[in-house]
Amino acid sequence: AWYRKEKAVDNVCTIDSVESMMPLAARGNVPEHFEAYREMQMEWIPYDVYARVCIFLAFMHLTHCWAYLQIGYLLQEVRAVYACAIVMLPMFVLQQVIMTLDIIPDGLPIHRLGPFGLWFAYFAAVIEYKRWYDPWTQEFGFFLVYCAYAIHIIYTIQLYRLCRPSEEAPSVAESPGASWWPGEWRLPKAFQHAIWLVAPPKETNEHDIVGELRDMQTGPSKKAAGTPHSDTDRRADVHRSFGKQGESPAWFSVKVGLISLLIAWVWLVAGFTWEVLN
């Protein structure tokens, strides 16, 4: 028949003749375009996910920066104590709202402490610029500064925990817009509802007409072959090209930034302690 000759002559490098790069037994029983898309998706999805996470981090730190700038300007230049408090309040609420919308915490929501650093810094600055000197008040101001630094250190550590790749995939939810990805992919589970990621299914009730015709012509497809492996083996094999630590380059960049921020906060604590002692 003409279609047999066309397949033999023109389609030399079809899906049947090219070895799949799907790792181990990670392939499912779905049409081949689902398999191909899921395989290609692993090339770019970590960058897409961590770009969304970086937007969250950027907004949180930008609002922190701007609020601290207003503390310095309104108290040092304008001496507007109440105007500064009015700025702190919406920034505090804004940060809490952003975390509510973007994060599903697993356990105690320690990250909620982050915005409270603004209030400790505000009251410490108010004490610093009070009219009359008082040793006890000055010591209390130092205590508030240390509280603000401690909050930021704990907050940064919690952000690291939330942003790191999770060992478990989110549970499957049959609802519109629900995020899901295979268990082999290591992505931050805390942001599952904010990254808008839906991977192709590995099992489906739809009929693969093209695949059925191909199997009738050439025999059973190879994609069902392979021995079963544990989730740990699949996860390690999926990330085999990520380097010695098995990490995505996208997560590595975010991790370096958060660790650098943590070191910077510790350095500020050391510098403030040196100033207090001298």
Image (spheres, rainbow, N blue to C red):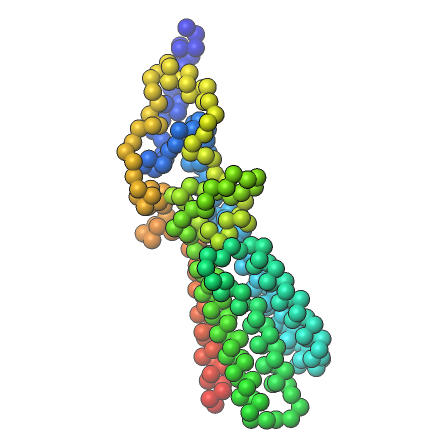
Residue located at (35% from left, 28% from top):
223
Q: Note whether residue 200 is visible.
A: yes
Q: Is residue 254 visible?
A: no
Q: Give the residue at the far top of this rendering.
A: 1
Q: In the rendering, at what x and y percent does residue 181 appear? A: 45, 42
- Residue 91 rendering spot, x and y as whole percentages: 64, 66
- Asked whether, in this view, residue 88 is left or right of residue 57, the answer is right
Q: Dividing the image into 4 quarters, which one contains the N terminus?
A: top left
In the image, 95 versus 21, the foreground residue is 95
The image position of residue 44, as x and y in percent, is 47, 43
Q: Is residue 196 left or right of residue 8?
A: right
Quadrant of residue 202 within the rendered picture? top left
Location of residue 4 with respect to 122 vertically, above or below: above
Q: Is residue 22 above or below residue 125?
A: above
Q: Hey, which quadrant is residue 135 in on the image?
A: bottom right
Image x and y of residue 278, in percent: 48, 90
- Residue at the spot 37% in from the left edge and 18% down from the top edge: 215
- Point 64% across, 86% down: residue: 129
**Residue 103 or 13: which is nearer the viewer?**
103
